[in-house]
Amino acid sequence: MTNAGHRLLWTIIALLLVAGGGAALAASLGALPGADPTTVLLSADLVDRWRMAAPWSTLATAVTGALFALAGQRLLARELRGPDGVLRGTLSHPGRRPGRTRLATDVLADALVRDLTGNPGVRRARVVLTGPPPHPDVWIRVDLTADAPAAGVREHVRAAVRRFAATTDCQPAHLDVTARIEPGHL
């Protein structure tokens, strides 16, 4: 789903919740025609039916509530994930002066990807950052061309990580680099 679709979906959900709350408030204040604020919310007939259906009515309500909670959790999880499925987040780092610096981790990861793909032997790169800001965990996967010199690419990756650590003031606590070499053409 696109960003516009997500915004539209969350807007519809918000409007439905506001409309439901407004209708309940208007009914309780007697502002709705035909709604008496002194009457009970559930009729005696409805309460009798609920009691006759026990324990199935309670079970059905619990299952319905659990399904709504699961749907809400799934919707929120999808909203927090980016287009490539990586969980979005922020890297927050306290500065020397009062205040904090906050950067989206995908911005830092994209910068490291651009730095890594600057080597002609690196065809593609993927970077994932997790963990606390002073010492995040960094996972890097590079796809190399068949003729890429391993020693040159290794030094290029080391230099890129050193530049990343120097510019962000975050020394990786864990660095995992995976290199995949594309098969050569015969």
Image (spheres, helix red, strand yellow):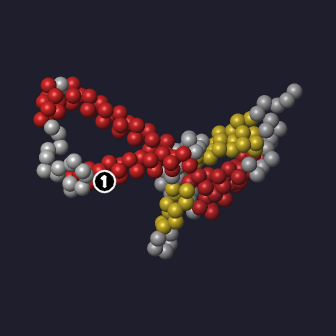
Neighbours of disc 1 within 10 Å: few (<14), some (14-19), many (20+): few
Above or below, comparing residue 42 to residue 156 in the picture: above
Q: Where is residue 48, by image quadrant?
A: top left
Residue furthest bottom as drawn:
97
- The amino acid type found where label 1 is placed reads Gly
> In the picture provided, is 39 more to the left or to the right than 150?
left
Above or below, comparing residue 131 to residue 97 in the picture: above
Where does the image place residue 147, in percent across and percent down from the top left? 83, 38
Where does the image place residue 47, in percent across and percent down from the top left? 14, 33
Where does the image place residue 16, in percent across and percent down from the top left? 38, 47
Where does the image place residue 42, in percent across and percent down from the top left? 17, 39
Q: How many marks?
A: 1
Residue nearest the observer in this picture, 70 or 91: 70
Q: Residue at coordinates 59% horizontally, 52% vertically from top-left?
A: 106
Residue 155 can be seen, yes or no: no
Q: Which residue matches tag 1?
A: 22
Q: Residue at coordinates 65% horizontally, 52% vertically from top-left?
A: 110
> In the picture provided, is 121 more to the left or to the right than 32?
right
